Each structure stands twice: as C-alpha cells, then as structure tokens.
Amino acid sequence: MSHPNFILLYVASPAESSAFYTRLLGKPPVENSPTFAMFALDSGVMLGLWASAGVEPAATPAGGSELAFAVQDAAAVDAQFEAWKTFGLPILQTPTEMDFGYTFTATDPDGHRLRVFSPGARG
C-alpha cells in the first residue's frame, strides 16, 4: 500500500492529451476511451488521463501537476530539451542548474509541468 503505482492527471480532452502523450512517450495508450486514456510506463507505473469534467468528486481545474523524468547526465537533459522544442512543447524553463541538478521544464496541453532533470549534474 505504500508504493503508489498509478498517476492520474485531470485533463480537458483525453483525446488531445492521449495524442500528445503518445508522441511524447513514443507508445500508444493501453486503454483509450472518450473520457479516459492510460499508458503503461516502462517503470511499471501507470499514467492515466481522466476528463476533468467527469471526475467524482469534482476535481480542481485541469493542470497544476508535474511529471519528472530523470535522465543520466546533463547531455541527456540538453538532448531532450532540443527534442521537445522540435515537438513544439511550450518551454517554461530552459536548461539550468538548480540545487537538485540540471533541469528544464515544459508543459503539456493542460498546463501540467514536464520536468527533465539529471540529479547533481552540471550543465
């Protein structure tokens, strides 16, 4: 019970978000309906995209969460930054050194933050 293995993001349009995450993750969802999509991540964690209009009890507005992707080193952070720029993702923070490591931040269609970082790396 102490090991969460399912992340739910409330989204405005599961179809739009599913297409976005299919491209971002390089894999299709394992479940896809008009109100919900689910991706099986390589780590075993499941990522669900749930239409915020149908969440009960009612959810806060879509957006406002952060998914973090740890990578091996600063070069991998920079490479992912360039790849996501070509995808046209909105970039909130260009690669920068922070107290926890080298990182950048983008957003998905609902404003959820997508952070790529290398712990302790120097850019």
Image (cartoon, rainbow, N blue to C red):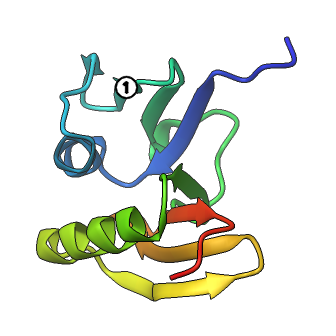
Q: Name the one closer to the observer, 68 or 7.
A: 68
Label 1 packing within 10 angstroms: few (<14), some (14-19), many (20+): many
Q: Residue at x 64, y 33 (%)?
A: 56
Residue 54 spot, x, y in % from top left:
49, 37
Q: Is 60 placed left or right of 17 in the picture?
A: right
Query: Looking at the picture, does residue 60 appear above or below residue 7?
Result: below
Q: Can residue 114 be seen here?
A: no
Above or below 12: residue 26: above
Which residue, as the protein is rendered here, is positioned at the far right? 2
Residue 97 shows in this picture: yes
Q: How many marks?
A: 1
The residue wearing badge 1 is 38
Question: Which percent across, then down, holds residue 77?
Answer: 41, 68
Left or right position of 24 against 41: left
| Residue ID at (25%, 23%) | 32
Question: Which residue, as the protein is rendered here, is positioned at the far top?
Answer: 1
Residue 117 place in picture, x, y as percent = 54, 64
Q: In the displayed structure, does residue 16 sit left or right of residue 102? A: left
* Rendered-image quadrant of the N terminus: top right
Determine the residue positioned at 22% across, 75% down.
82
The percent position of residue 46, horizontal first and vertical second, equals 49, 24
The residue under label 1 is which amino acid type? Met
At 52% from the left and 45% from the top, the residue drawn is: 9
